[in-house]
Image (cartoon, rainbow, N blue to C red):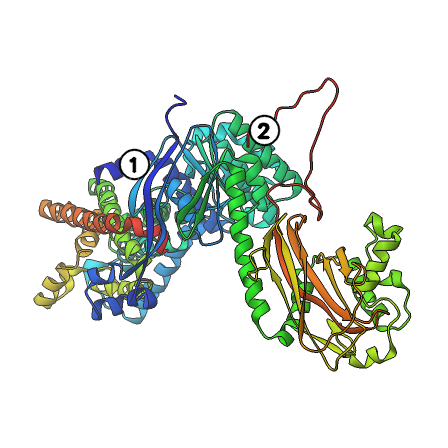
Amino acid sequence: MSAAPAVVAAGLSKSYRKWGRTRAFGTLKSALLGRGLSAALSPSESVAALSNVSFTVARGETFGVVGPNGCGKSTLLKLVAGLFKPTAGTLAVTGKVSALIELGAGFHPEISGRENVVINGVMLGLSRREIERKLPEIVAYSGLEDFIEEPVKTYSSGMYVRLGFAVAVHVDPDVLVVDEVLAVGDESFAHRCLDTIADFSRRGKTIFFVSHSLSLVEELCDRVLYLEHGRVEALGDPRETLARYRMDVADEEGARLARAQGENQAALRAAGGDALRAGQPAEHRDSALFSEGEKGGETAGAAPAAGAPQPHSPFEEKPPERLESVRQATTPSGPAPPEQKESLPPAEEPRRWGSRAVEITGCRMLDAAGAERYAFRSGESVTIEIAVAPRAPITDFVFGVGVFTPEDVCVHGTNTEIDGFLPERLGGPAVARVTLPSLDLGTGTYLVDVAVHSRREAPYDYWRGACRFQVDAPDRSAGVYRPARRWSFDGPLSLAKRSR
Amino acid sequence: MLNNLAGLWRHRALGFVLVSRELKARYRGSVLGFFWSLLNPLLMLAVYTIVFAFIFPGRSPSTSPYALFLFTGLLPWNWLAGGLTDAASSLTTHGALLRKILFPAEVLPLVAVAAQAVHFVLALPVLAAGLALGAAGALGPPVPLGWPLVQAVPLFLLEGVFVAGLGLFLAALTVHFRDVKDILATGLTLWFFATPILYALPDIRAARLRAALLWNPATPFFEAWRDAFFRGAWVAPERWGVLVLVSLAAFLLGYALFDRLRDSFPEAV
């Protein structure tokens, strides 16, 4: 019994008809006058949503589907649910399918929750008697005992979804198709959904799971299918498949960032600031401190601590001497010359400031091969390149770089002074590079500040968020720092190394 | 097609709950509730009676008492017109369902027709009361009543098949051509006057016009309803033949088109 697979797809393709003129106008008149009716009803062009997708889902397996928007996930689900017919290939589904594609689809707003449950249950394939028998259970599961006699139009969207979910799981399907339903509903309901799904899995039911929550997919699924442009990009072990997907997303992100980087540098200065602020979560404390930090830089002689606003970081509460000096070296929070004020636009948050005795003309990030990139795998070698041009030859100069999280936590900051270089002469346009042989950062987006300043930390050109890059870690370890690590154990305990 | 119809039979419970939902939802929140099913035809009846009995009087004896005559035509017409209107938009208004839940799509237009049939049945007590008055001679010349009334049962079934067939046809077309609904609204008005509802077919003097109206597929239904309810006559056997043919032809045609376009519904609605 368990040998028979629940879902077998072979060479599955689905194209949507792109209706030509008739679709655009959709009028009978145009069909009758223009071409014949049959011509109007035949597609003029088709768009492939899925092409040649093959997979087998064993009974009792939890099968995940991931991919970017428009990759064909929903089409695949609708095919599995039997709503759409494949254009080519075959799809065999064994057993009753219940699709949680849209919870509460078909609820009529005017009639009561109870009546809607009955109708929905019958629609999902239960007999009237079965649904009447399960009704108390469904109502209890949804937790809507007090509202079940009210018309559904009075329900909140969360109540609506809870009732829909309750009906769908009580249909007792052999194959449960779950499409991003956990995104709605509150925390406790999401937990109940997950419990129910886990319970289904224990009872040997097949689950077809689609979600953009990759950690959830990784947690729940036995195997994962990664779709891209309607094709199978990867299929198999969740960790491997999801790592591949994450890398692809990061590459795409990197390409986008690189394009942005290539655009007009001046435009970037403004855009970078906006993107940074838009990308930040609404943490008012941080953003307030963030601008306070800026003001600290603006006001000559502000306390250095005001520029280092990370109250949640244990290092910042009692900053060790070295970190503090790094911070000072890379941000203008230390004593700044008064002429700095003039270079700042008054109403705007400064993204770049300094006397411009030396100007930064460009900043790029390079990988080990020397190619410009803005998406890296954790542990890769990364080079930050700063191109500068002095107004006149100069002998007092320090190059600095800092890596920050979008929340403005300094991940690392250093400069040529700290690293033991004494400036001798900068005579014309030049390039400084600093290589981090192993970028031991956790998954996330980071920002790079680059600066040229005097040895007494008077900024010539400080550019905040000059680059933005993405790091992808192959595991789910937490935090911005992701060092190599080794475990060892002593005593009466034993652990087995997981094969994957 | 037989397979599909068998599948439909398996989904009869769905049809049943959907019809009851349709009816419940329609009158939910209204004070009079199901009485609207009676009131609507009564109000229409009042208007037509006033217009044709007092404003344009002088009807022929074959149509009097005129109120009763009109009512026996209006009731089945309301079913036909309401059923077609609701059926035509049934797939497009329930598009979300078609995309999300797997069930035979023909349930939707059939439910629309069936819900209108329920309204028709609910209005029958009014008709019965009218007929009782008419038979007693309270409304004018006494109406002959008797066994021919039983013909209402097969007539009801045949009209159901006829309207269902046209409803399927229109529903399938509406998915692809949204202007079917507008065409239908105008078409029904024309059809109403081309069908012997306000008048009796034998009263038309111009023989060619009368012959032309006989080509109207709805004409035999209304003549038959009048035979059963108003004239107390037995419907001629050849008319029964025509009725069966017309209903089956309409159903087969509608179902064939519906079946052909079926797979396009979830994507096109």
Q: Tell me the chain of label 1.
A: B
Indicate the position of residue A378 as horizontal and vertical percent values.
63, 48
Q: Secondary structure at mark 2?
A: loop
- The quarter of the image holding the C terminus of chain A is top right
B75 vs A473, left or right, is left
Q: From what the image shows, is residue B176 above or below residue B20?
A: below
Indicate the position of residue A381 as horizontal and vertical percent values.
62, 52
Query: Closest to the observer: A154 or A279?
Result: A279
Mark 1 sits on what residue? B7
User: What's the residue type where badge 2 is placed?
Assistant: Arg
Is residue B195 in view? no
Q: From what the image shows, is residue A425 above or below residue A182?
A: below
Quarter of the image holding residue A307?
Answer: bottom right
Q: Which mark is residue A496?
A: none
Indicate the position of residue A260 as horizontal and vertical percent values.
58, 68
Query: Closest to the observer: A448 or B250?
Result: A448
Query: Closest to the observer: A161 or A359?
Result: A359
Mark 2 sits on what residue? A498
Label 2 environment density (alpha carbons within 10 Å; few <14, some 14–19, many ≥20): few
User: What's the residue type where badge 1 is placed?
Assistant: Gly
Indicate the position of residue A320 as horizontal and vertical percent values.
87, 51
Is residue A436 in view? yes
In the picture as drawn, the residue positioned furthest to the top comes out as A492
Q: Secondary structure at mark 1?
A: helix
